[in-house]
Amino acid sequence: MHTFLWGALPYAALVLLVAGTVWRYRYDKFGWTTRSSQIYESRLLNVASPAFHYGILFVLAGHLMGLFVPESWTNAVGLKEHAYHLLSLFGGTAAGALAVAGIAALLYRRRTNTPVFRATTRNDKLMYVVLLAALVMGMWAKLTNSTISGGYDYRESIAPWARGIFTLQPDVDAMTGVPLTFQLHAVIGMTLLALVPFTRLVHMFSAPVQYLFRPYVVYRSRSTTGPATRKERRGWERVDS
């Protein structure tokens, strides 16, 4: 089981991620979307969606830095271990809390708004459960294994194992002494990666860089007085209130 979890499961998740994404792009281009539900409700969405997206981006950035940037590199630029620990503890917790608050609000909106709930697929329902579990377990693992003065240093165990996956030499023995909460977080995270191509999360591969700074999508009803007399203009356009 130990070898399967840390030597085989990562590659199974990566194969599903890559192969599933290619399959989805080739055979389900029209389904490659988040299936926007803004038309049904926008007030809560305009708060919850940015909170979740900004939170999850900071969480992702923290994971990439913690797992794939060696400690010697951060020391070389002046970010010593204790400073990095505090950044990880407070910054990671804040980002995780923001993402959890955002997804909690999105789930509340999706469950209490009938048209939005009906637009949710079974795969997406499973994705929400796994995504929320990954966020909560990650925060739980960090908070229960850390204090202000120090804590479990995952950069000496989990990080070498994660980097070894991409060099085809995963150090499964490095995961032996890892706290159970961190192990559960890693397994849930790999499960989430495998689910990405089959849920609305696939849209992240086509979101442009300017996505977070784009204007809101404004839905207008069709004019009842005849065809529009003004030519449409692309890009940013002022909307009258």
Image: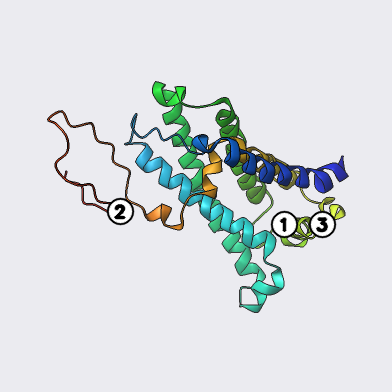
Could one spot residue 82 in this view of the protein?
A: yes
- Where disc 3 sits, the SS reads loop
Kindly identify the residue that appears in the image at 23 percent across and 31 percent down: 221
Apparent side of residue 241 relative to residue 234 in the rendered image (left or right) = left
Q: Residues within 10 Å of mark 2 (few under 14, many from 20)?
A: few
Mark 1 in CB contact with mark 3 (< 8 angstroms)? no
Kindly identify the residue that appears in the image at 57 percent across and 25 percent down: 122
Q: On the image, numbered disc 3 is attached to which residue? A: 168
Q: Position of residue 169 (x, y in %)?
A: 84, 58
Q: Residues within 10 Å of mark 1 (few under 14, many from 20)?
A: some
Q: Nearer the viewer, mark 1 or mark 3?
A: 3
Amino acid type of the residue that numbered disc 2 sits on in the rendered structure: Gly
Q: Position of residue 10 (x, y in %)?
A: 76, 47
How many angstroms separate mark 1 from mark 3 (CA)? Answer: 26 Å
Q: Is residue 42 above or below residue 140?
A: above
Q: On the image, numbered disc 2 is attached to which residue? A: 235
Kindly identify the residue that appears in the image at 79 percent across and 59 percent down: 164
158 or 210, nearer to the observer = 210
Amino acid type of the residue that numbered disc 1 sits on in the rendered structure: Tyr
Q: Nearer the viewer, mark 3 or mark 2?
A: 2
